[in-house]
Amino acid sequence: MAIACGASSRADVVVDIGSDTARLGFAGEEFPRKVVRPSSHERFMWYSADSGGPAKLQPEREAIEEALQLATSMGGEKRQSLLLSEPNAQSSAFREGIAELMFEGLDVSEAALVPSAVLAAFGAGRDSGVVVDLGAGLTSVADVAGPNSTFKPEGTHICRPCT
């Protein structure tokens, strides 16, 4: 699957998938329109860790697909633009699997995958800081670097399928 990365015009539907719930809404709105739990599995994703090692993300693809299908039906347009909050403890395999699902399975026109810590900082009106996320499946601490920092967080990808 080829992905071209560049500037996106906008992200209509915002999707924040946590371990137990997915929050779905529209960009610019203060609160999500829908908060859903997976019907096909107990959770959207699991985390596992070796003793003392970092958490490893174990996504439930069918449950995530269910949430994304619901999100793409919210806007009323045939091809949707999505802003997806990705877990701080994610892998490139997770990102590639989600991109494949959105572009090939759900006919999403554009998608931005952004680490949840970055979105939390922006939502609080900050462009830098330390974000502590106390979730149902994982607690994470992430450093968000501002635009003038020499360190830039990797992992923010604005992508659309190649035509």
Image: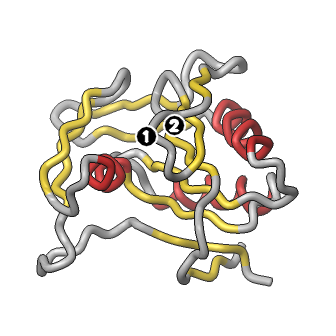
Q: Nearer the viewer, residue 53 or 97?
A: 97
Quadrant housing residue 56: top left
Q: Residue furthest front?
A: 29
Q: Nearer the viewer, mark 1 or mark 2?
A: 2
Q: How is the image coloured?
A: secondary structure
Which residue is painted at 53% across and 58% down in the image?
A: 95
- Residue 3 x/y as whole percent: 64, 77
Which element is circle 2 on? strand
Which residue is painted at 25% across and 28% down in the image?
A: 134
Number of numbered callouts drawn: 2
Give left or right: position of 144 versus 39. Answer: left
Q: CA distance from mark 1 to mark 2?
A: 13 Å
Q: Amino acid at mark 1?
A: Leu
Quadrant housing residue 42: top right
What residue is shown with label 2? 17
Quadrant housing residue 7: bottom right
Which element is circle 1 on? strand
- Residue 103 x/y as whole percent: 74, 62
In the image, residue 99 sits, relative to residue 130, either above or below, namely below
Which residue is painted at 71% across and 56% down in the image?
A: 102
Which residue is painted at 55% across and 22% down in the image?
A: 43
Q: Quadrant of the N terminus?
A: bottom right
Q: Which mark is residue 35?
A: none
Q: Which mark is residue 57?
A: 1
- Residue 138 x/y as whole percent: 31, 29
